[in-house]
Amino acid sequence: MVLMNVSRLVMSRADEVFPALEKIPAMQRRRLSPIAKLALNTAIQALSEQQADYIVWVSQYGDEHKTLKILEDVLNDQTPSPTQFSTSVHNAVSGLYSILCQDSTPATSLAGSWNDGLTEAYAWLKTAQFSGRVLVVYYDEPLPDIYAEHQPFVAFAMAAMVTLKPENLCLKLEHMTQDAFSFQQALQFYHFWQDERQTESAAWTKC
């Protein structure tokens, strides 16, 4: 059982506008992939309310569309673009945020679920030498159609600030499951956290 405090959730969806990205110069903004725009917009919005001492970026698939393009180039005997490669790796969004927003906050990138991000944040807070704040940013978009695991959904990013006190969420580790599609878990948590009438689920309890 893990106890923590989770702030108000910030959510961005692919079918919405991204006002927070106005802080990034237009030329650099245009070069961002759709999933990077989602993640950065959400992080910037969350950080406009309070600063973080650590950031956890978490996504199941990352920018898989760029990875597929690199694989197609290799199959067609073409040299993959170095820029395409450098922005396709799983921690690319974290690096882009640090560079474009000139923010040197320590960060880590996970290939996982929303619960994985919460657990990572909790572990950092428990080992920190001071009472800190961790921003958890989850983002994902559907895999390209060519993949057998393709599931259609509207790409989104979700973020929250996590602290240890005052406790308002109990994460029951023994009931945490590794869902085949992590985006479903993130959306389930979003609806759970927004619904004042729902106080308990298999893995989460409001306290």
Image (cartoon, rainbow, N blue to C red):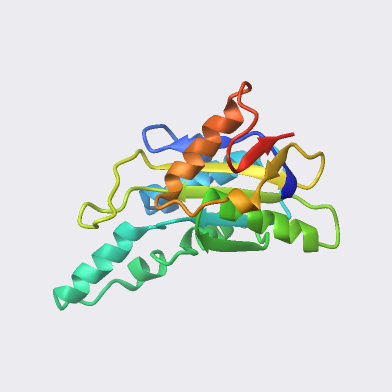
Q: Is residue 17 above or below residue 142?
A: above
Instruction: Answer with left or right where residue 178 lies relative to residue 103.
Output: left
Q: How many marks?
A: 0
Residue 179 x, y percent position in the rendering: 45, 51
Q: Is residue 59 left or right of residue 172?
A: left
Which residue is drawn at the image coordinates 30% and 57% (left, top)? Answer: 65
Q: Name the residue located 79 percent from the left edge and 52 percent from the top edge.
A: 132
- Which of these two is toward me, 28 or 58? 58
Residue 67 visible to the viewer: yes
Residue 123, horizontal then vertical, whole percent: 71, 60
Depth check: give the residue in front, 198 or 126: 198
Q: Quadrant of the C terminus?
A: top right
Query: What is the residue that sits farthest to the right in this orientation?
Result: 130
Q: Residue furthest top?
A: 197
Residue 7: image x %, image y %?
69, 37
Q: Residue at x 20, y 57 (%)?
A: 146
* Residue 157 in view here: no
Tell me where residue 156 appears, x and y as whole percent: 43, 41
**Is residue 69 shown above or below 53?**
below
